[in-house]
Each structure stands twice: as structure tokens, then as C-alpha cells.
Amino acid sequence: MSDVTEHPVKLGGVHHAAYRCKDAKETVEWYGKVLGMEYTTAFAEDHVPSTGEYDPYMHVFLDAGNGNILAFFELPNQKDMGRDENTPAWVQHLAFKVANKDELLAAKDHVESLGIDVLGPTHHGIFKSIYFFDPNGHRVELAADIGTDEQYAELKRVAPMMLDEWSETKTAPRHADWLHELARKEHGVS
């Protein structure tokens, strides 16, 4: 792996992450009601600025906190929105940070009070998460960090070895097996 300092691109963070939605208004209202995101901006055009092609859209932007922006496109002239059927529903998701375990549990209570099914909390060793789906079928995760500096340092230390081993074997390396020890016990997996 090359050293990042050698690369001429200097990133300043994620400007925004954009996904497709079925209905822009419903999506803005849902993210406001469920996650407290402020609706900040909308772009709407009949022609795509980057390509010039005709494809009317509404592009909405929501403040996810700490300078992070989540955006959605409603594309009424495209085929109905679907998902990659070759990828399990749990893989592609939007994960948001909450301050601590208490806030995670309060968020779970809030989301469930809105009639939304919530999975978790799930223990990931260095954070705990809950999961649920937005009205577009996107999986949403809320995560509270619980790890120690030593745990994060150990994960950084073993990350290159894990990637190399995975690349060669396509089986889960055991360098950080402790991460999901509690989750495996909870599901009866050894």
C-alpha cells in the first residue's frame, strides 16, 4: 500500500453522500422526524449538469451534523427504484454516529415509537449499533463508540495483515476476533 502523504490529492472530508429516493418530500420529512436532520438545500433541473442529458430530478440535501451532508435524488423518469439483489440487504447502509450508549438506547426507543422495526443493539467490540430501514429501503445504522485507545491502536496495527490474508484466502482472518465475540455468543455462533 502506498503512503498517503505521497498522493497529491488532499481531502478535506466528505462533501456529501448521495443516494436515490422514491419521493423527495417523504424522504426529507422522514429523516427530519426520525433522525432530526435539517433540510438545507434543493437542486432541481431537467438536464443533468455533468452530462447535459435530459433526466429531470430533485436533489435534496440534509444536515447529518458535524459538517456531514446526506443527499438524495428523486428521478421520476427512471425505472422504479430497486436495490442490488446480488448484495444482501445488511451490507449497503448509512451509518451515523451518536454520542454514547445512552443516546443509542434513547434513539432506539424514539425510532420504535414511530412504528419502525429496530434491530439491536449489536456489539461490535469498539462500538454498539442499531439498525432499521428508511422508506426507500436503505438500511440505516446508528452507532455509539465504546472502544479504548488501545483497541483502536491494535485494530490499526493488524489491519494490513488482515487485508493481505483476506486477499489471499477469502476467509475471515482472526487477528481481531475479539471484536464480535459477544455478538457471536448472542447468536449461538462459535
Image (tube, rainbow, N blue to C red):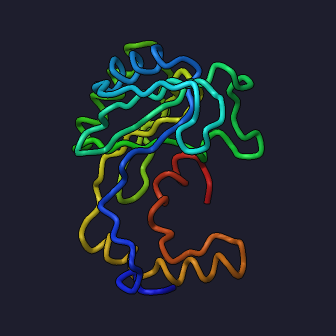
Residue reaching furthest to the front: 52
Residue 166 percent location from the top left of the image: 64, 76
Residue 95, relative to residue 127: is it above or below?
Answer: above
Residue 137 percent location from the top left of the image: 59, 28
Residue 20: image quadrant is top right
* Camera-side residue of 59 and 154: 59
Residue 10, relative to residue 118: is it above or below?
Answer: below
- Left or right of 43? Residue 148 is left
* Camera-side residue of 91 and 48: 48
Number of numbered discs visible in the structure rendering = 0
Residue reaching furthest to the right: 86
- Left or right of 75? Residue 182 is left
- Left or right of 189? Residue 170 is right
- Left or right of 69? Residue 91 is right
Residue 164, relative to residue 114: is it above or below?
Answer: below
Residue occupying image coordinates x 29% and y 61%: 12
Residue occupying image coordinates x 57% and y 77%: 163
Residue occupying image coordinates x 33% and y 22%: 109
Residue occupying image coordinates x 45% and y 14%: 25
Residue 44 percent location from the top left of the image: 47, 24
Residue 158 percent location from the top left of the image: 45, 80
Q: Quadrant of the C terminus?
A: bottom right
